[in-house]
C-alpha cells in the first residue's frame, strides 16, 4: 500500500478532489499536494502543499526526495479546448511532465504512477457507439494526440523498464468543488452553475451532442481502485476505457428543469463542437469491469440532484 503520495496538479478540477480523498484515506501527513501556483486556497491551506513545476525535472525530483514519495498522481495537463489555442504549450506540458514522472519511476525514485488519459484519444474514424478498448485511434486535437502518445509511452516504460504506471481514459467529469478549465465537456459543469445563478445557459455545443460523462465521486473511486488493484489484475498497461453514462446538453437541461422549471437553454455551437463531434458517444469499458471490478454509481438524475444541492449551498 502507498505510504507517501504526491499529487501534481492538485489545484485542478480532479486533482483537488483526489487530494481531499487521499488525505482522508492515508492521513494528511502522507499526502503532498503540489501545483505550479497557489490557485486553490482550499487545497493550499488544508494540508501539505508545495509549489512544483511539472515541466522541471529537478523541481519534481526535489519534492519527491524531500518527502520520500513512493506514489505520484500526475494530474497536471492542458485540456482539449485550451490546447487548440496553444498547441505547442499543450504538447510541451502534457508530454514533458509525463516523461519526468516516468523517468523518476525508471530511476526507482518512485514505485507507482497514476496518469490520466481521456476519451480524446479517439477521433472521427473511431466507431462512435460503445467504443471498444482496441480500435482505430486518430485523435484530431493536440490534447488527444498527447494522451494517445502518452499511453504508448506508459506501456513502453512498463515493458522496457518495469515501471508500474496505471491509467484511465476519463470521460467528461462533472463536479461542484473546483471548476474544470479549458475542456470540451466543461459545459456539463457550467450549465449547473448558470441554472442557479441565471436560470439560463447558452450552450457551446448543439443540443444533440452526446458525450461520455461521469460524476466526480465515480472518477475518484475508479482512480483509487485501479491504484489499489493487484498488479496482475491491471492487465492493460496503456490506459483503460472507463465509462459511467452518456448524455446530450438537451438531456441535462431537461433533468435540470425537473428541479428548476423556469430554466432556459440556448445553443450556440463554437469551435468546441468540432472537437466534440470527433469523440465517441459512448464507451465500452468491459475490461475495467472485468479486470479490477469497476462499477459506476451515479446516473444523470443523481448527478443533477447532487450538483444542484451542493451548488445552492455554495452560492448562498
Ligand atoms: N474533459 C476533457 C476535455 O474536454 C476530456 O478528457 O478536454
Image (cartoon, grey):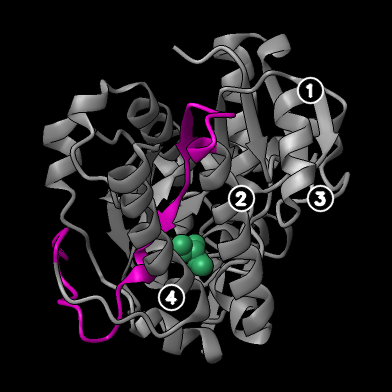
Query: What element does badge 3 sit on?
Result: loop
Give coordinates of residue 149: x percent, y percent: 40, 68
**Magenta stretch: dominant SS?**
loop
Question: Residue at horizontal 39%, vertical 38%?
Answer: 163
Query: What element does badge 2 sit on?
Result: helix
Q: Nearer the viewer, residue 68 or 205?
A: 68
Q: Does ligand 1 reach within 8 Å of label 1's beta carbon?
A: no
Q: Which residue is mark 4?
A: 145
Among numbered discs 2 and 1, the one appearing first in the sequence: 1
Give coordinates of residue 283: x percent, y percent: 21, 59
Question: Residue at horizontal 72%, vertical 49%?
Answer: 57
- Mark 2 vs mark 3, foreground winner is 2
Q: Alpha-carbon distance for marks 2 and 4?
A: 18 Å
The label number, if any, that marks residue 50 in the structure image? none
Q: Which residue is mark 1?
A: 66
Q: Quadrant of the N terminus?
A: top left
| Residue range corresponding to the magenta coloring | 105-134
Question: Residue at horizontal 15%, vertical 77%?
Answer: 127
Q: Nearer the viewer, residue 189 or 230?
A: 230
Q: Quadrant of the C terminus?
A: top right
Task: From the viewer's perspective, tell me whether residue 28 is left or right of residue 257.
Answer: right
Among numbered discs 1 and 4, the one appearing first in the sequence: 1
Among numbered discs 1 and 3, the one appearing first in the sequence: 3
Q: Which residue is mark 2?
A: 100
Give coordinates of residue 270: x percent, y percent: 55, 91
Q: Alpha-carbon distance for marks 3 and 4?
A: 23 Å
Q: Which residue is mark 3?
A: 36
Task: From the viewer's perspective, tell me whether residue 53 is left or right of residue 273.
Answer: right
Query: What element does badge 1 sit on?
Result: helix
Task: From the viewer's perspective, tell me whether residue 306 is left or right of residue 293.
Answer: right
* Marks 1 & 3, CB-CB < 8 Å contact: no
Determine the image quadrant of residue 90.
bottom right
Amino acid at each position: 500500500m502507498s505510504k507517501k503520495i504526491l499529487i501534481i496538479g492538485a489545484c485542478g478540477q480532479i486533482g483537488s478532489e483526489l487530494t481531499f480523498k487521499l488525505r482522508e484515506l492515508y492521513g494528511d501527513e502522507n499526502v503532498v499536494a503540489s501545483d505550479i501556483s497557489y490557485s486553490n486556497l482550499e487545497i493550499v491551506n488544508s494540508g501539505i502543499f508545495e509549489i512544483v513545476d511539472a515541466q522541471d525535472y529537478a523541481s519534481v525530483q526535489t519534492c519527491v526526495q524531500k518527502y520520500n514519495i513512493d506514489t505520484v498522481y500526475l494530474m497536471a495537463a492542458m485540456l482539449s479546448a485550451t490546447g487548440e489555442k496553444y498547441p505547442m504549450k499543450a504538447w510541451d506540458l502534457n508530454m514533458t511532465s509525463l516523461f519526468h514522472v516516468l523517468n523518476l519511476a525508471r530511476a526507482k525514485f518512485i514505485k507507482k504512477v497514476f496518469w490520466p488519459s481521456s476519451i480524446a484519444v479517439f477521433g472521427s474514424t473511431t466507431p462512435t457507439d460503445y467504443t471498444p478498448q482496441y480500435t482505430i485511434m486518430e485523435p484530431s486535437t493536440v490534447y488527444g494526440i498527447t494522451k494517445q502518445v502518452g499511453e504508448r509511452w506508459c506501456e513502453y516504460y512498463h515493458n522496457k523498464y518495469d515501471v508500474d504506471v496505471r491509467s484511465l481514459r476519463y470521460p467528461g467529469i462533472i463536479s461542484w468543488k473546483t471548476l474544470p478549465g479549458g475542456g470540451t465537456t466543461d459545459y456539463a459543469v457550467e450549465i449547473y452553475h448558470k441554472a442557479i445563478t441565471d436560470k439560463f445557459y447558452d450552450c457551446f455545443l448543439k443540443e444533440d451532442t452526446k458525450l461520455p460523462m461521469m460524476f466526480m465521486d465515480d472518477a475518484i473511486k475508479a482512480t483509487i481502485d485501479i491504484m489499489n488493484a493487484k498488479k496482475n489484475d491491471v492487465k492493460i498497461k496503456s490506459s483503460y476505457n472507463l465509462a459511467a453514462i452518456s448524455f446530450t446538453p438537451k438531456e441535462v437541461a431537461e433533468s435540470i428543469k425537473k428541479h428548476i422549471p423556469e430554466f432556459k437553454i440556448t445553443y450556440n455551437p463554437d469551435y468546441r463542437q468540432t472537437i466534440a463531434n470527433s469523440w465517441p458517444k459512448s464507451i465500452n469499458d468491459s475490461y475495467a469491469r472485468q479486470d479490477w471490478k469497476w462499477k459506476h454509481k451515479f446516473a444523470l438524475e443523481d448527478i443533477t440532484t447532487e450538483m444542484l444541492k451542493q451548488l445552492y449551498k455554495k452560492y448562498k
